[in-house]
Image (cartoon, helix red, strand yellow):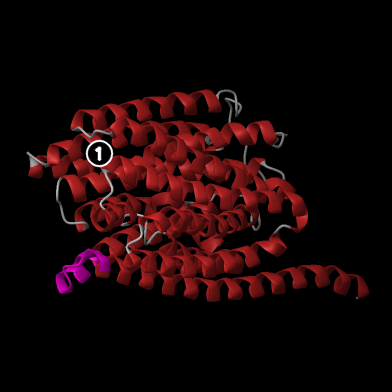
């Protein structure tokens, strides 16, 4: 019998998520800003590239099923990280070539972002599936939040270090920074995974016949709780990622910040996300087996607070006071972190429910919903900015309108979270009364 992973193992897997985040944050924030501000491309171009890497992640259920079927998840994690690291480096190289060789550079960028999507999907899905299948149930919510906190820590460290290194900005500095981050990410992942799983497959699901991918997906989709949660994840993450690709260009165009300053601003936002996630992790650890019952409240509250702070961000721009920018961005990150941590913790807590041996497929389904929402949110946010600027050349008006639209999406997500909470409470009530009813017969 394979032993559960304790806290030392959870921390080691969290280092893998840290490495993953360090590569991804450069592609979704710094490269995006360089393309829009320094090179002068339309915001829709980096938005489309990031959306492409999310579109590839629609295959997450297939990768999750593959790790379910094989019984070992670490080869998928390490292989995915290697593909991600190479894609991240090629994306930086393509960015610096765009100014002088647009067509071939764009082709290279498309290939690079496809690799990034494959790497994130294969590595991230298998990592969370490993946690869901090897962590004791009462630790899953806290473990998921802890791992995500470590990913945000990777965001913060990377943006702080790279932000300092990039000023004054040169294309050579960008390529060197990306190469260094990619090499460190692969090495850290390899060290963290060493000895984590036995070399031989542990014989997963010997008591039930093997299913093909379509049958496994049908089995998971037939679970009401999994189906309801998939819908919630899509809508809520659509709202969550709307400002991801436009925050740095917004700060550069509206407040005149330099590339290094906007990269550091992204670090401020991720610092707030970290604070919100740490708080949520402490709550999940404190409540232990009862954590499922409090997660819904955190999701609802985080969504409402995010809506209010996006409105405040728009007001800060109209006030033209840069002193309020960082505090508002930090608080927005905190609200986002509290909501996201609760959603991720719920995802981990529910991944082990239902049929055994389907953790990877289940996590892949939710990961695909999240990826589609992330890609759609980032791309639609960037396109919305371009569209608004076609009506009003003032970037302040364009970005503020988009922020208000994202606030509305967060309010809709809060309403959906209420429904998910009611469904979960009804399911727990049925599970509690069923044994008693059976005993009275």
Q: Position of residue 117 (x, y in %)?
A: 34, 45
Residue 418, by quadrant, is bottom right
Q: Secondary structure at mark 1?
A: helix
Residue shown at 22%/64% (left/top)? 395
* Number of on-image labels: 1
Tell me where the magenta segment starts and ends, as one range.
384-396
Name the residue nearer the viewer: 221 or 111: 111
Q: Can I make out residue 93 in this image?
A: yes
Task: Answer above or below: position of 164 versus 246.
Answer: above
Where is mark 1, residue-wise? 91
Name the residue nearer the viewer: 272 or 168: 168
- Say if the magenta span includes residue 385: yes
Residue shown at 18%/45% (left/top)? 38
Task: Answer above or below: position of 266 versus 190.
Answer: below
Q: Position of residue 405 (x, y in %)?
A: 36, 72
Q: Position of residue 363 (x, y in %)?
A: 53, 52
Badge 1 crowding class, 10 Å Cα cut-off, few under 14, some 14 to 19, many 20 or more, is many
Magenta portion: prevailing SS class:
helix
- Say if the magenta span includes residue 110: no
Give the residue at the far right of this rendering. 440
Report whether 115 appears left or right of 353.
left
Residue shown at 42%/75% (left/top)? 408
Report whether 229 appears left or right of 93.
right
Residue shown at 21%/34% (left/top)? 93
Q: Quadrant of the N terminus?
A: top right
Q: Position of residue 108 (x, y in %)?
A: 18, 39
Q: Can I make out residue 66 in this image?
A: no
Q: Quadrant of the C terminus?
A: bottom right
């Amino acid at each position: 019998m394979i032993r559960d992973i304790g806290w030392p193992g959870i921390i080691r897997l969290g280092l893998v998520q840290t490495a993953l985040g360090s590569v991804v944050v450069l592609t979704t924030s710094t490269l995006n800003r360089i393309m829009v501000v320094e090179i002068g491309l339309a915001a829709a171009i980096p938005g489309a590239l990031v959306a492409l890497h999310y579109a590839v992640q629609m295959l997450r259920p297939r990768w999750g099923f593959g790790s379910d079927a094989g019984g070992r998840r670490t080869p998928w994690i390490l292989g995915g990280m290697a593909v991600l690291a190479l894609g991240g480096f090629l994306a930086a190289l393509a960015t610096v070539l765009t100014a002088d060789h647009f067509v071939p550079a764009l082709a290279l960028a498309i290939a690079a972002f496809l690799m990034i999507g494959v790497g994130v999907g294969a590595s991230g899905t298998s990592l969370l599936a490993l946690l869901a299948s090897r962590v004791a149930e009462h630790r899953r919510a806290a473990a998921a939040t802890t791992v995500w906190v470590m990913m945000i820590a990777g965001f913060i460290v990377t943006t702080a270090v790279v932000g300092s290194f990039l000023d004054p900005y040169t294309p050579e500095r960008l390529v060197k920074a990306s190469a260094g981050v990619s090499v460190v990410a692969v090495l850290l992942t390899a060290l963290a995974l060493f000895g984590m799983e036995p070399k031989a497959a542990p014989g997963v699901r010997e008591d039930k016949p093997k299913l093909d991918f379509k049958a496994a997906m049908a089995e998971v989709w037939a679970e009401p709780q999994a189906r309801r949660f998939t819908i919630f994840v899509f809508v809520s993450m659509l709202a969550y990622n709307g400002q991801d690709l436009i925050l740095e260009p917004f700060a550069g165009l509206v407040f005149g910040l330099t590339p290094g300053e906007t990269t550091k601003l992204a670090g401020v936002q991720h610092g707030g996300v970290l604070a919100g996630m740490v708080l949520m992790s402490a709550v999940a650890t404190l409540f232990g087996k009862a954590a499922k019952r409090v997660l819904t409240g955190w999701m609802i509250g985080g969504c409402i607070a995010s809506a209010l702070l996006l409105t405040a961000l728009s007001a800060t721009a109209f006030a033209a006071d840069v002193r309020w920018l960082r505090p508002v961005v930090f608080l927005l990150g905190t609200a986002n972190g509290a909501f996201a941590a609760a959603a991720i913790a719920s995802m981990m807590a529910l991944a082990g429910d239902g049929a055994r041996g389907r953790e990877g497929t289940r996590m892949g389904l939710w990961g695909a919903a999240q990826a589609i929402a992330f890609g759609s949110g980032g791309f639609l946010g960037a396109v919305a900015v371009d569209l608004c600027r076609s009506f009003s050349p003032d970037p302040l008006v364009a970005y503020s309108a988009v922020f208000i639209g994202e606030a509305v999406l967060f309010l809709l997500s809060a309403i959906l979270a209420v429904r998910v909470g009611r469904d979960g409470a009804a399911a727990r009530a049925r599970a509690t009364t069923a044994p008693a009813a059976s005993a009275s017969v």
